[in-house]
Amino acid sequence: MSEAATARRLKDHAASLTTMTRFVLATLALASGVYTYLGVRSLLDGSATIVFFAAIIYSAAVSVGIYGFWTYLLRFLPEMRDGASRLVLVAVMAVGSVMIVAMSSWLNAAALAGSAAVEQHLAETLEDYTGDLDQANTNALGALSLLPDIQRAGERFARLAEDERDSGALTGTSGSGSVVQLLTQMAAQMRELEANILASRETVATLFKEGQTHLAAMRGLVSGSGPIAPRSDRFAEQAVALAGVIAALEQTSVAPSVLRAAEDLSVGFIAPVADGSTADLAGRQDVVMATIRSSVEAQSKALSKAAEQILAQPKVPDRRYVPLSSAEAVLLYGGDFVPSWAGAISIDLLPAVLVAIMAVVQAAVRRGEEQMADTDRITAADMLRSLEIHDALLARRAAVGPVSPDAVAAEAPEAAGPEPADDEDRHDDERLAGENVTPLSLSERKRSDP
């Protein structure tokens, strides 16, 4: 009897929660429609009127579809008694859930976290552009690392020329001969190369400062407040300007020029003819110029190797800022917005929990009813209906009226068989009584709608 009482209470509770269940479904469908509307608006283009009505129609269709889908499942799935039917409806529920996620949940996520996802896209793009500017500046200033070696080589050639002119430190004879001329020529080439590198440093510094100005403006747009769409448009303008600065820095590098100049030191080496007044002096001049040639070749190889290392540094990749809508940003950075995705999907699929609850409750009610006696299954409403039928039968019999004893005795000799009229009246009474009796099935109960 305890299981019967439990089944009866569960049926009463299910019937009392019908209105609440409908209210929950309507509320969840409405919430999903609202966020779907917000997500759809971020995807549509055109006039404000067209966008508004298109988004309204789509969101209304989603709300009605979600409400109807879960209503059907709440009505039918808990009533399935065999496992095959129940599995088919569960599969239908799974397919419908996937369709709901496809048509609504991702738009809900776009409405919940779309602005944050676009801001993250801007932040990551800003980080990439910051790295590109630093890399371009490093590549452009790479030739500055050669500046000490170039200055030292130029000073050495100039000092040797001065010593040779004043005291004949190299040939043993002072004066401005061919050796001094060669050393002065090499010192002038080094000073020219040094001047080119120093001039490029000023250009690089100016471009780098301009790039930092663009980065500062982009950081302000990323961390600013207000609608994300206007900020994204201004961010794109700054990104285009910064890309131009980075390209200019790439072209400003003097490393290729240094490499060509270093190769020209040895390839284009032109030694003057020894102009010594004597054969001995001319011979010493040839020996010194051969030594200078070897020194220039060694210096040329060292500068060329250093310049090649600078040119071997990674180039700045070509980068182009691609604006994203809120829905596209949510899909691209979905892993960073798991809570928003979970909330958006839960709004649409929470009724599945109600379906599972109703299925468990109905199964418990059926198990309790299987162990109930027929008398336990009759409700007060059934008893009242039975009494009404009983009263109707009594009223029908009273209307027909009883048969008098005298009439029965007078007609007894002729009662060899029942008169056709009497038989016909009796059959009519039985037929009318059968029509007034409504059969009751005790094995099947009328269930309240969920």
Image (cartoon, rainbow, N blue to C red):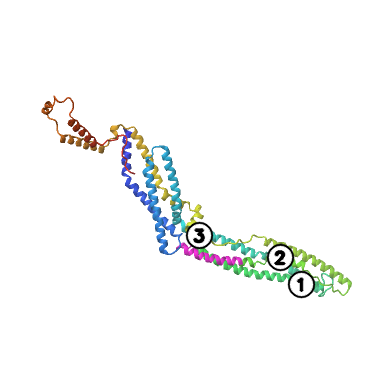
Instruction: Give coordinates of residue 415: x percent, y percent.
Output: 16, 25
Q: Report whether residue 142 is seen.
A: yes
Q: Tally the numbered discs.
A: 3
Q: Residue at x 77, y 63 (%)?
A: 298
Q: Say what amino acid the circle numbered 2 marks.
A: Leu
What range of the chain is rendered magenta? 222-247
* Tags 3 and 1 touching, CB below 8 Å: no
* Tags 3 and 2 touching, CB below 8 Å: no
Q: Residue at x 50, y 60 (%)?
A: 324
Report the disc number at residue 259: 2
Examine the rendered structure and indicate whether residue 430 appears above or below residue 42: above
Any magenta on residue 300?
no
User: Given this view, does label 1 or label 2 mark the residue nearer the observer?
Assistant: 2
Q: Residue at x 39, y 58 (%)?
A: 56
Q: Which residue is mark 1?
A: 185
Q: Say what amino acid the circle numbered 3 marks.
A: Leu
Left-right relation of 288 to 123: right
Instruction: Give coordinates of residue 100: x percent, y percent.
Output: 43, 50
User: Given this view, does label 3 or label 2 mark the residue nearer the observer?
Assistant: 3
Q: Which residue is mark 3?
A: 324
* Label 3: how many Cα within 10 Å (few below 14, some 14–19, many 20+): some
Q: CA distance from mark 1 to mark 2?
A: 19 Å
- 212 or 430: nearer the viewer: 430
Sequence-wise, the earlier of marks 1 and 2 is 1
